[in-house]
Amino acid sequence: MALLVWPGRATTQTDVRIGVKASGTLKSPLLLERFRAGAGAETDARNAHDVVRHDFDLSGVFAVADVEALTEKLTPNPAEQGTVRVQGNVEMAGPGLQFSGEVLDIGSGESVFKRSYPTTRGDLRRTMHKFNDDVIEALTGERGIAETKIAFVRVSGRVKEIWVADYDGENGRALTHDNSIALSPAWAPWGSEIAFTTFKRGNPDLYLFDLVRGASYPFSTRPGLNTAPCYSPDGKWIACTLTRDGNAEIYLVSRDAQTARRLTRNGRIDSSPSFSPTGNQIAFTSDRSGSPQIYVMDTEGSNQRLITLEGKYNDSPQWSPKGDRIVFASRHDAVFDVIVMDANGQNPVQITFQAGHNENPRWSADARKIYFSSTRSGQRQIFIMNPDGSDVVQLTKGGESFNPAAGPRGKKRLQAAGSG
Amino acid sequence: MQRTPRIATLALAALLLGMLAGLGCSSRKQVTTADTTPPPPPPTETTTPPPPPSEPPSETTAEPTAAGLEDAFFDFDAAEIRNDAKDALTNNGRYLQGHGSSNVVIEGHCDERGSVEYNLALGERRARAAKDFLVSYGVPATRLTTISYGKERPFDAGHDESAWAKNRRAHFVSK
C-alpha cells in the first residue's frame, strides 16, 4: 500500500442534516419534489426533474432527497430550519414548454425563490441548469456553475483535439479538427475564446480559438515551445512557456500578440503559469531545485519563491478563483495525486487516494468543485470532485480525455462585476 | 419577505461575507481597467497562409530514424547525457561529419509520467542537450534543429519501466 506523504487527509461527512463541514462549505438539506406535469408534458417533467436532481447533486452545495409533491400548503416546521423544499411544474405552452420552479424554506414556510421559464424540449436541459444556478444564487449569494462549459483534450489514436462540453460532460463536441496534437486548453475570462497548443504546423504553437466564429488564429509561433497558456484576469495578457531564448521560461504575451515580457531567468524548466484572481501573482512549476516544485512570483517576475515544502515532484498548480488556495498534482510512491494547499503553501491536504494517477486539477468557476483527470477507470478520463475529495463523479467516457479547463460563468457575470 | 440567505449558518455567512468582501475589493480594483468586451483577434490572421493539409495519422508510432543515427536515452525527469548516450551521440557525430550535406531534426521525447506541459519542456531540454553534444563534437549547429513532443508520441505504448525507458529519448529524423 502506498504511504501517504501528505499530513492532512480530508474527511468526508455524510450527516448533512446537522450542517457539518463538507467541501469547504455547508451541504444543505434539499427536498426535491416530484415535478407536476400539465397534460402532455409528463415525460418532460420527469426529464426536467432528473436534470436538476443531477445538478443539485453535483453542486457540492446540497444534500438532496426525493419527495412526493405536496398536496396542501406547507406547514412551517422551525425544527427543520435550513432545509429547503424545491417544487417544479412543466406545462405545454404554445409550441413549447413552460417550467415553473419554487423554493420553500421549511423552517418558515415562506417562498424564498420563484420563477417561470419559457423553454422548449430541446432547451429543457439548459433551462434546468439555469434554474439550478438561480436557486444556488438565491440561497447562497453566489451563482452555481451548471451553465458553464468545460474544455479538454480528447484522444483518438495519434490525434488529440480540443473538445468542449457542458459543465457535467454532456453535449461534448470537437472544437478543433486539425488531425494533429492539440493540448492545454485555457479559457479567456470573457468565455468565448480558448488558447491552446497545437502541432498542426509542425511546431508546438499557441493558437486562439474564437468560439463565436468557430475558427482559430495563430497567437505565438516562435521557434521552440509555445505552451501552457493562462489568461490574466483582465484578459489583456496570456502567461505561457516559450523556449525562444533557449530554455523553458515563463513570459507574458499581450493578447494582441505585440509584446512579450520574460518573467523567469534560469537554466532549468519554468512552466505552467497560473494567475491569482487579483492578477498580481503567478503560481508556476520550476525544477530549478532539481525536481519540479510549485513557486509563486509577482506578475512582474520579482519575488520568486518556493511554496511547496513537501513532496519530491509537484506540478500543474492552479490558483483558486477565490485566491485562498492552490491545487496541484504531486507524484509520490510512483503515483500522482491531487493536493490542495493554502496559497502560501501551508496546510497541504491530499484529496485523491489509491485510484490510479490523478492529475491536471482545475478549479470550477465558483471554486466549489475541482475537475481533474484520472486513470482510475482505465484510460485517462475527466472527473469532478469537491475540494475535500468527496463526491467524485466521472464526466467523460470512451476513448481518452485529459487536460480539463473550467469555463467562466460568462460575459453577463463579468459585466455585473464591472458595474459593481 | 426576508431575503437573507436561508441555508447558511452564521459561521458560513461570516465566511462568505469575508470572502465576498475580499473579492469585492480586488474585483472593483480590476474593473476600473478591465475590458470585458473581447479584444479583437491578433493581427496575424490576415498575414498567415492557411495551414497545410493535415497528414493522415500513420500506423506506426515512431517517425523513421535517419539512416545511421542512433537514439540517445535518458533517465526519468533528467536531460543529462548518460554514458551510453555519449557513445550513441559520438557515433552520430562521426556519421554526420562523414555525410556533410544531411540535416537532421532532433526530437525530444518523454515517458508518460507527469504533465503534458512539464514533459514538453523536458523533451525540449533533452533535444537541446543532444544538439549541444553534437555541436561540441564539431557538427555545425545550422544542420541541427530541435523539437519536443513531450509525452505525446511514445515509441512504446506500454505502462512499465521497460516502455518508459524506450520513450525517454532524443530521436533523429532526416530533414
Image: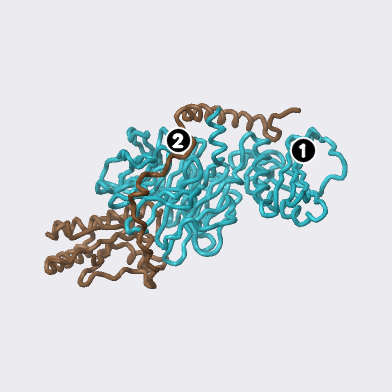
Chain colours: A cyan, B brown
Amino acid found under the numbered disc labelled 2:
Asp
Quadrant that contains the C terminus of chain A: top right
Identify the element where label 2 is drawn. Answer: loop
* Residue A61: % across, % down: 64, 42
Residue density around tag 2, few if under 14, some if 14–19, many if 20 or more, within 10 Å? many
Residue at 76% x, 46% y: name it: A88
Chain assignment, label 2: A
Where is residue A416? Give x, y as percent. Answer: 57, 32
Residue indicated by mark 2: A234
Residue A1 appears in the picture as rendered: no
Which mark is nearer the camera, 2 or 1? 2
Residue position for label 1? A104
The chain letter for the residue carrying disc 1 is A
Give the Cα separation between the discs numbered 2 and 1: 39 Å
Quick check: can you spot residue A415? yes
Q: Dividing the picture into quarters, in which one does residue B5 lie?
A: top right
Q: Residue at x 33, y 66 (%)?
A: B166
Q: Nearer the viewer, residue A256 or A381?
A: A256
- Contact between marks 2 and 1 (CB within 8 A): the answer is no
Q: Quadrant of residue A81?
A: top right
Where residue A154 appears, x then y in whole percent?
A: 48, 59
Relative to residue A82, is residue A345 drawn left or right?
A: left
On the same chain: label 2 and label 1? yes
